[in-house]
Amino acid sequence: MVRFTPPVTLKLSQGEVIAWNQAATRVRVVSGRVWITQRDDLIDHFLHHGQCFELRRSHGTLLGAEQDVWLRFERDRSWRGSLSGAWRWLTRRATRAATVAG
């Protein structure tokens, strides 16, 4: 399993598969073709150059390279993504303030 913080660009070689088990994010195909399958989704998704897909946070998402592919992972732009980011920022500030004061 790969762990990183978007935004990041990643290359997968033909036949390579990665499991997605992170926060919701958007994946954009920079070049090539990718296959995406998610638990509880009856449809497998095939994306090519220029197409995007919203990955949800889940255990059971796989991305497979149909051919060599470059993927751009971008932060979730939804209100939930913004709200959770703001909450993490506030929590870190409160923790630092409590540590300095304490």
Image (cartoon, rainbow, N blue to C red):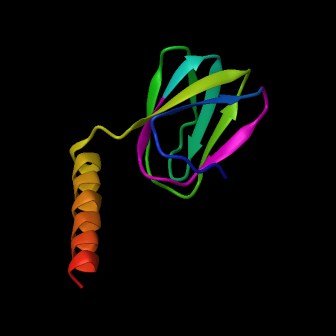
Q: Residue at x 76, y 35 (%)?
A: 16
The reply, left or right, for residue 43 in relation to residue 2 is: left
The reply, left or right, for residue 69 in relation to residue 7 is: right
| Highlighted range, magenta | 14-27
- Residue 69: percent from left, percent from top: 66, 22
Q: Does 22 lie within the magenta span?
A: yes
Above or below, 31 relative to 80: above
Q: Residue at x 42, y 41 (%)?
A: 25
Q: Residue at x 21, y 70 (%)?
A: 94
Q: Residue at x 26, y 41 (%)?
A: 78
- Residue 68: percent from left, percent from top: 73, 21
Q: Quadrant of the C terminus?
A: bottom left
Furthest residue to the bottom? 102
Above or below, 40 relative to 13: below
Q: In this view of the protein, which residue sits in the foreground, 34 or 41?
A: 34
The reply, left or right, for residue 37 in relation to residue 54 is: right
In the figure, residue 53 lies in which quadrant?
top left
Q: In this view of the protein, which residue sits in the foreground, 87 or 53?
A: 87
- Residue 1: percent from left, percent from top: 67, 52
Above or below, 25 relative to 60: above
Q: In this view of the protein, which residue sits in the foreground, 99 or 82?
A: 99
- Residue 88: percent from left, percent from top: 29, 60
Instruction: Tally the numbered discs.
Output: 0
Q: Does 50 lie within the magenta span?
A: no
